[in-house]
Amino acid sequence: MKQLSLFFIVFVCASIVVWNWEKTPRLTILLPPHDQPVQLFPVMQEEVKREQVTPVTDDFKEDEPVIDKLPPSLSTNAASLNTRQDNEFPKTQEEHHTTEPAVREHIEPPVTNVEQQACNFGKGKWIPADNRPLYSGFGCKQWLSGMWACRLTQRTDFEYEKLKWQPKDCKMDDFTADNFLKRMRNKTLAFVGDSLGRQQFQSLMCMVTGGEEMPDVEDVGTEYGLVKAHGSTRPDGWAYRFPTTNTTIIYYWSATLCDLQPVDPTTHTTDYAMHLDRPPAFLKHFLHKIDVVVLNTGHHWNRGKLNANKWIMYVDGKPNTNRKIADMGSAKNFTIHSVVRWINTELPNHPGLKVFLRSLSPRHFFNGEWNTGGTCDSTTPGALEVVHDESSDPVAAAAVKGTEVKLLDITGLSLVREEGHISRFSIRAAPGAQDCLHWCLPGVPDTWNEVLFAQI
Ligand SMILES: *[C@@H]1O[C@H](CO)[C@@H](O)[C@H](O)[C@H]1NC(C)=O
Ligand SMILES: *[C@@H]1O[C@H](CO)[C@@H](O)[C@H](O)[C@H]1NC(C)=O
Ligand SMILES: *[C@@H]1O[C@H](CO)[C@@H](O)[C@H](O)[C@H]1NC(C)=O
């Protein structure tokens, strides 16, 4: 009898708990809006495919075919990129991750310690603002690539230009060119990364110039070795100096944040050693001349690109034999951790240096993939708010943990902005293909720079 009533009590308690669990509105509120988050990781694992379909949009210079950092002899390989695919990211595993941020949040106590924590710029909401965009998409011809200037395409909706990011738990200074230049007096800011890094670079150039012609801005590429090598079609990046404040802004092309070296420098058909555990030589060489570094990678980690570029993974100066880092997702993670660790150990030698790892810029292919008619036709955001505390890019977040390198966490706030991509207005993509990887400018990458500005 005693046992029976005990059982009964336990049963009743359990029912109440379950009933409350189902009832509590927090659970649904905290679930990210729409089916968005489900997008992210499928997106991440196939991010690279997009680049294969429009090698030109992902590339380095708009008026050239493809290629990352190919020697001139290889630049005819463009077409081969189109045919390659990559399915190396384990789908189920990645999908499993997608639920994590939301789920963890229920378990954690309510938001009480937010004030004590460093401000989280990645959490907040998009609000309409009359003072956006910060420059005109018809202007900025000096810096803005035509292929990213959606104002110059057939696109007719431009509401996406008028949203401003408002972090929830912190104040964010409004970006002004004057304030930026003052803060960066005698200083140099360098973006090092892939084409999304280049978008952020162009965006910043437009923000600082207000999109106006500025003939007095000096090209100082030669100071950083950014010159067109003999026989190649482009330099590895650009450097510009604003003479009034002696402020320099650099972009350096490093799609994987690895050091790339010819295996056999004596031939031009050589393979390239892609040293996963060595930072790009440029960074090593010029770190002492840089005050703010913004690193990014993500969209080039696919077998097709590696093969087409003849990049061979090296670790410890030798071809990689470690199966644990041989697949693309692991190699990317390993590299991001390596470069962050390296630069973190350099920080004591460079007082004042600030380093940011920019989290992944999400892709948005709906109803298909880059090569199966995937689209991003929406003219409205998927959601306006990011409610979770944790980054939507756990790889980047884990890499900076315990280091002085900061996370420029733009994944979540960009993830809800599916309407901000080039979409079908791509002037470079193959017919029928859409660019749901790169962003219209002015647009979402401007906000990445505002969030960056707030932290420098
Ligand atoms: C900028 O550099 C110049 C020349 O080295 C120096 O005279 C000036 O004081 C510096 N300004 C600031 C704000 O550091
Ligand atoms: C510009 O800034 C650099 C430091 O970034 C300094 O070495 C140089 O002297 C400055 N030049 C002028 C003209 O102030
Ligand atoms: C990423 O790399 C770090 C360092 O090599 C490792 O500790 C971590 O477990 C890796 N994470 C994943 C998801 O592979």
Image: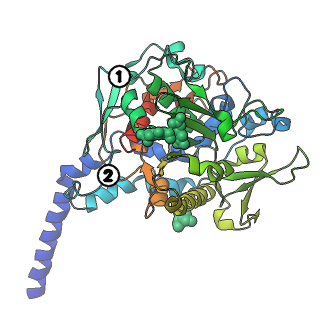
Q: Amino acid at mark 1?
A: Arg
Name the residue that disc number 2 marks: 389
x and y percentages locating residue 206 in the rendered image: 48, 24
Q: Residue at x 41, y 18 (%)?
A: 158
Q: Is mark 2 within 8 Å of ligand 3?
A: no
Tell me if residue 139 comes above or below residue 181 in the rendering: above
User: Position of 162 compared to 80: left or right?
Assistant: left
Q: Amino acid at mark 2?
A: Asp
**Residue sitting nearer the eye, 293 or 85:** 293
x and y percentages locating residue 57 in the rendered image: 63, 29
x and y percentages locating residue 84 in the rendered image: 73, 41
x and y percentages locating residue 246 in the rendered image: 50, 33
User: Position of 200 compared to 72: left or right?
Assistant: left
Q: Residue at x 24, y 46 (%)?
A: 169
- Occupied quadrant, residue 74: top right
Instruction: Give the position of the C terminus as an image quadrant.
Output: top left
Which mark is in front, 1 or 2?
1
Judge whether residue 376 can be spotted in this image.
Answer: no
User: Position of 172 compared to 217: left or right?
Assistant: left
Disc on res. 132: 1
Disc on res. 39: none
Judge whether residue 252 can be spotted in this image.
Answer: yes
